[in-house]
Image: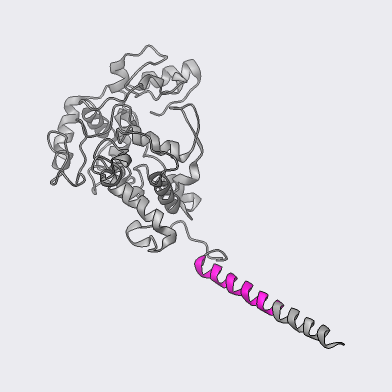
């Protein structure tokens, strides 16, 4: 064998070793940064707990957007609302925070948790009568619950909130997703909501946090609400889901009084939650523009939607305060549609 041929073989051999070494190194780096990829360990659903954003978000560049999304959720007014330094990112029109409805930064069962939410989109929504994505759902909240305007889909704020929701939705056992979806069910009372009873319940259970005037607690006007206002000018508008008595009753049953009720151990009965939800929603609040375009197929409108038009002949008063079972029965009979709220 000639010397130049031998040198060529040696060069190829050394090159192969170097390439193999680089590949092994890159593989080890991948395993280091993705430790669960080849894990055979399965989490027992009973032992599983949602991530804690205060302690579990890694402090690295990869999770920077997730951490910002968390900040937007817990201090919405400061970062994307009326108190934001940059007027261009004042998307929220009130001083609520997302977590006023999605409790504890979206990690609490029974309060429209973000846990697993990314796994449920795209989904059909009757309010728009189409398949919608997660960004559209977030903007629905921005325009209604936050009484503001839609965020550009490509904005850093939108990307951050979705990144946070994606992070909370990672690795959720399918058996647990249902527990964290939406609100708890309420057995609809076959009576009209009683505002007098609602006020009595509010006085006993709600007034210490939300105050007699319903304006909540905000010791510092330059800070977020300690407890949010429930009516007036600085709260959700009349197009929000929370303005529907049955939806509000579901939220209240599982979550209020705060830190005293849980989805599986509520303090209020279904009927008590129903009456106090009606009382809260009996007061003036901001009005969303063009509510008549909601639910292009009016048959899909929830029975407790308090604004028209409707395809039925029930009064606006009954659509707001009930009794709702006759409306539910009418839609079942006329259209074969089974409504739950």
Name the residue located 43 percent from the left edge and 47 percent from the top edge.
Answer: 159
Give coordinates of residue 123: x percent, y percent: 50, 36
- Look at the image and tell me whether residue 330 can be seen: yes
304 versus 39 height, above or below: above
Give coordinates of residue 237: x percent, y percent: 28, 29
> Where does the C terminus fall, quadrant-wise?
top left
Give coordinates of residue 131: x percent, y percent: 51, 32
Residue 187 versus residue 217: which sits nearer the camera? Answer: 217
In the image: residue 160, left or right of residue 82: right
Name the residue located 49 percent from the left edge and 61 percent from the top edge.
Answer: 43
In the image: residue 282, left or right of residue 315: left
Residue 16 image-quadrant placement: bottom right
37 versus 325 height, above or below: below
39 versus 149 height, above or below: below
> Where does the N terminus fall, quadrant-wise?
bottom right
In the image: residue 3, left or right of residue 53: right
Residue 337 versus residue 216: which sits nearer the camera? Answer: 216
**Magenta residue span:** 16-34
Give coordinates of residue 109: x percent, y percent: 36, 47
Name the residue located 78 percent from the left edge and 85 percent from the top edge.
Answer: 7
Magenta span includes 304: no
Residue 327 versus residue 221: which sits nearer the camera? Answer: 221
Residue 285 image-quadrant placement: top left
Residue 74 versus residue 14: which sits nearer the camera? Answer: 14
Magenta span includes 20: yes
Name the residue located 22 percent from the left edge and 30 percent from the top edge.
Answer: 280
């Amino acid at each position: 064998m000639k010397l130049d041929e031998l040198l060529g073989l040696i060069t190829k051999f050394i090159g192969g070793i170097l390439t193999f070494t680089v590949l092994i190194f890159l593989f080890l780096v991948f395993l280091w940064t993705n430790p669960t990829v080849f894990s055979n360990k399965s989490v027992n659903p009973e032992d599983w707990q949602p991530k804690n954003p205060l302690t579990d978000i890694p402090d690295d560049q990869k999770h920077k957007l997730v951490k910002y999304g968390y900040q937007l959720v817990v201090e919405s007014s400061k970062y994307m609302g009326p108190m934001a330094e940059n007027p261009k990112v004042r998307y929220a029109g009130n001083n609520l925070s997302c977590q006023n409805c999605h409790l504890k930064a979206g990690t609490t069962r029974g309060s429209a948790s973000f846990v697993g939410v990314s796994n449920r989109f795209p989904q059909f929504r009757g309010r728009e009568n189409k398949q919608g994505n997660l960004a559209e759902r977030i903007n629905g909240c921005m325009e209604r619950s936050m009484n503001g305007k839609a965020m550009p889909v490509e904005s850093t704020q939108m990307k951050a909130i979705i990144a946070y929701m994606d992070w909370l939705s990672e690795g959720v056992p399918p058996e647990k997703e249902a527990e964290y979806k939406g609100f708890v069910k309420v057995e609809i009372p076959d009576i009209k909501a009683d505002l007098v009873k609602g006020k009595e319940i509010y006085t006993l259970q709600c007034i210490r946090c939300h105050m007699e005037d319903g304006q909540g607690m905000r010791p510092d006007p330059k800070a977020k609400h300690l407890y949010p206002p429930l009516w007036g000018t600085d709260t959700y508008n009349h197009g929000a889901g929370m303005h529907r008595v049955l939806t509000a009753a579901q939220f209240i049953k599982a979550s209020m009084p705060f830190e005293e009720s849980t989805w599986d151990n509520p303090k209020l009965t279904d009927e008590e939650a129903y009456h106090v939800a009606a009382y809260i929603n009996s007061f003036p609040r901001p009005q969303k523009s063009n509510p008549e375009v909601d639910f292009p197929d009016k048959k899909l409108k929830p029975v407790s939607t308090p604004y028209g038009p409707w395809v039925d002949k029930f009064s606006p008063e009954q659509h707001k305060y009930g009794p709702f079972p006759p409306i539910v029965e009418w839609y079942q009979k006329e259209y074969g549609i089974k409504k739950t709220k």
